[in-house]
Every structure is written in structure tokens, then in C-alpha cells.
Image: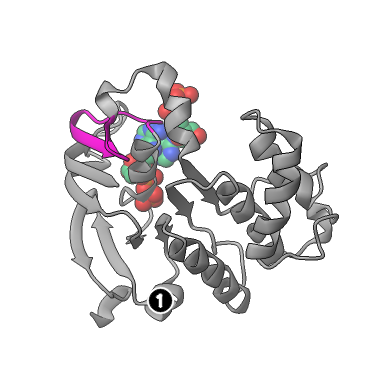
Amino acid sequence: MIHFDNVTKLYPTQKRPALDGVSIDVDKGEFVFLVGPSGSGKSTFLRLVLKEEKPNSGHVHVAGKDLAKLSNWKVPHLRRRIGCVFQDFRLLPNKNVFENVAFALEVIGKPRRFIRKVVPEVVELVGLEGKAGRMPGELSGGEQQRVAIARAFVNRPQILLADEPTGNIDPATSIGIMKVLDRINRTGTTVVMATHDAAIVDSMRKRVIELEEGLVVRDQTRGVYGQAY
Ligand code: ADP
Ligand code: ADP
């Protein structure tokens, strides 16, 4: 589903590459933690998957497509197949839960009756049944992240990318967020989550890919974070 072949990304202003000859394969339906210190290249990896950045050398394939051969007008189509979740939720503050999730479908022209059917299903999937009318400001951080996940998933993307999704959430609430991501993964969606959260990584026992200064220093099935491996 995601195939990096000897990918190097050097930002013009930097001396050292953000990614340095990285080769990674993520299969359909996998759940992968991308770990490593700040500046190790995790976000760059995610931006390359979205074709927000281009590699200086090497090849990136996503969902069977060589991104170097994907013309610019097809990039929005690629991004529709990839849901994104961020540390800071990025909800529309003046829209309620239903409207925030529905918006993702409105912008791609889905009919209103379809939206009315699928939005409540996804709101329930993330555990927010009964809260569809709430405004983001009336929700806890964990609940806001559930809305963001619902919005990322409502279009049934093949891939869900999450960049530090538990970074602004307390540990107890984070466990609930991980259950939601696990539920989404079990529908067949490939999940890649960049994180610093050792407790979460250790509790999930999923594949762990560790980056350090742009190099893959570990790729472990059912891995843990930190020094314990
Ligand atoms: P633009 O494409 O508008 O010229 P850049 O590529 O310079 O923007 O930056 C893209 C994003 O990355 C911006 O949010 C910018 O603040 C951030 N950024 C720029 N330089 C760095 C850096 N050295 N480390 C981390 N983030 C950076
Ligand atoms: P992480 O997500 O692991 O913190 P990043 O991929 O954001 O790592 O950053 C990797 C390296 O690339 C860092 O040295 C960072 O400063 C640099 N970097 C990231 N984005 C930019 C950018 N837009 N312009 C220049 N340098 C960047």
C-alpha cells in the first residue's frame, strides 16, 4: 500500500537529509507506528506519502501508483484515498460534530441523502453517538480528536495517516483514541501513526518503525518503544 524505495529527501535549506535512503513497505491493512525523536523524519515521511513533498532520489508508491508519475491534477484524487489526523484536531469551530464530518463529503460532491446516512454511522463508530449536535468548543480534547478521526474516515480512505494524534490528550483518554484507530484498522484500512507516546506504542504491540536522523534504525513486528526491545 505504501512502498518507499531508497528514498532521500533533502530540504534545500538543510545540510543533512530529512530522510536518507529509506526503504519501507507497508502492506494493505497493516497498523504501523512511526517513532523517533523530534526531527528524525516522521512528518517528512507522511508528507511524501501525500505528495506534499517530492523526494530528491528514490521512489514512492502509494496505493499502487508511482507518485513521480502522478500528474499534479491527480494529486487531489490520491489525497482522497488518504485520511489525515493531526495533533491539533483542526476542526471547523463554527460547525457542529455532524457538520464537521459531513463537510468532508460535501467538498467532494456527495449527495445529501448519502451524507445523512453515512455521517451518523461514522459518528457512532468513533463513539460519539448522541453528540452529533455539539460544537467543538463543547467537547473534551479526546472527543474532538474522535470527530477529527470520523472526518478523516468518513470517505473510507484506504490509508489513515495520524501525526501525533494523542499528543494533546491525557493518557487515559488516549487509550480510547487508540481503540478507535484499531477499530478503523480492523475494517481493512492501513494505519500509519507517527508518535512519541511510548506507553501507547507499548500497549498496542503493533509494527514499529523507528527513524533516527532520517535513517530507519529499527523495523519490528509487535514492537515496543524505547530501550526495552
Ligand atoms: P513554503 O513551501 O511555503 O516555502 P516551507 O517548505 O519553507 O514553506 O515550509 C513548509 C512548512 O515547514 C512551514 O510550516 C514551515 O514553517 C515549516 N518549516 C520550514 N522550515 C522548517 C524546519 N527547518 N524544520 C521544521 N519545519 C520547517
Ligand atoms: P519529525 O516529524 O520526526 O519531527 P521532520 O520530518 O519534521 O521530523 O523533520 C526532519 C528534518 O527535516 C528536521 O531536521 C527538520 O528541521 C527538517 N525539515 C522538516 N521540514 C522542513 C522544511 N519544510 N524545510 C526545511 N527543513 C525541514
Side of 85 where 133 appears, left or right: right
Q: Residue at x 63, y 54 (%)?
A: 150
Number of marks in picture: 1
Can you give x and y, in whole percent of width and height, for residue 213 in the image? Answer: 24, 51
Q: Residue at x 71, y 42 (%)?
A: 115
Q: Measured from the top left, where is residue 7 in percent x and y? A: 19, 39
Query: Residue at horizontal 84%, vertical 56%?
Result: 134
Q: Amino acid at mark 1?
A: Met
Is residue 64 a member of the stretch shown in magenta? Answer: yes
Q: Is residue 53 above or below residue 147?
A: above
SS class, disc 1: helix
Judged left or right of residue 62, residue 163 is right
Label 1 within 8 A of ligand 2 by Cβ: no
Q: Which residue position holds label 1? A: 204
> Ligand 2 is located in which of the four quadrants?
top left
Question: Which residue is at 29% across, 29% downward?
Answer: 67
Image spot of residue 148 (x, y percent): 63, 52
How dense is the environment of label 1, judged by Cα within 10 Å: few (below 14), some, or many (20 and up)?
some
Q: Which residues are magenta?
A: 51-66
In the displayed structure, 50 sits above or below 164; it is above
